[in-house]
């Protein structure tokens, strides 16, 4: 029983850390710097100001 609780606790910590890493801020100078920034389709990563953001690009 104690081992199950340890495994569940470790999974919670792992998922929490994964969430923090995937929501990290990416500083950019151009759209080329945002290639590794993840966005859900149909949005694409673009450099807006100095930060990468997900933007809907039509056409």
Image (tube, helix red, strand yellow):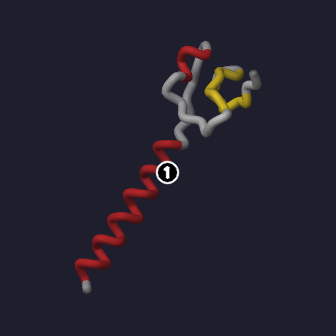
Residue 40 % position (x, y): 61, 39
Q: Can you identify the residue that label 1 sits on?
A: 19
Residue 53 placement: quadrant: top right
Residue found 43% across the figure and 50% down from its top:
18
Q: Is residue 34 above or below residue 18?
A: above
Residue found 46% across the figure and 43% down from its top:
21
Q: Report helix, strand or loop for mark 1.
A: helix
Residue found 63% across the figure and 36% down from its top:
41
Residue 22 % position (x, y): 49, 42
Residue 59 % position (x, y): 75, 21
Residue 6 placement: quadrant: bottom left
Q: Is residue 2 above or below residue 28?
A: below
Asked if residue 36 lies left or right of residue 1, the reply is right
Residue furthest to the front in view is 59
Asked if residue 44 lies left or right of residue 38, the reply is right
Quarter of the image where the N terminus is located = bottom left
Q: Is residue 33 above or below residue 22?
A: above
Residue found 61% across the figure and 16% down from its top:
31
Residue 50 placement: quadrant: top right
């Amino acid at each position: 029983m104690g081992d199950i609780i340890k495994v569940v606790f470790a999974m919670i910590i792992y998922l929490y850390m994964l969430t923090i890493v995937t929501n990290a801020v990416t500083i950019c100078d151009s759209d080329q710097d945002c290639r590794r920034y993840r966005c859900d389709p149909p949005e694409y990563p673009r450099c807006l100001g100095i930060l990468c953001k997900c933007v809907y690009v039509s056409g």
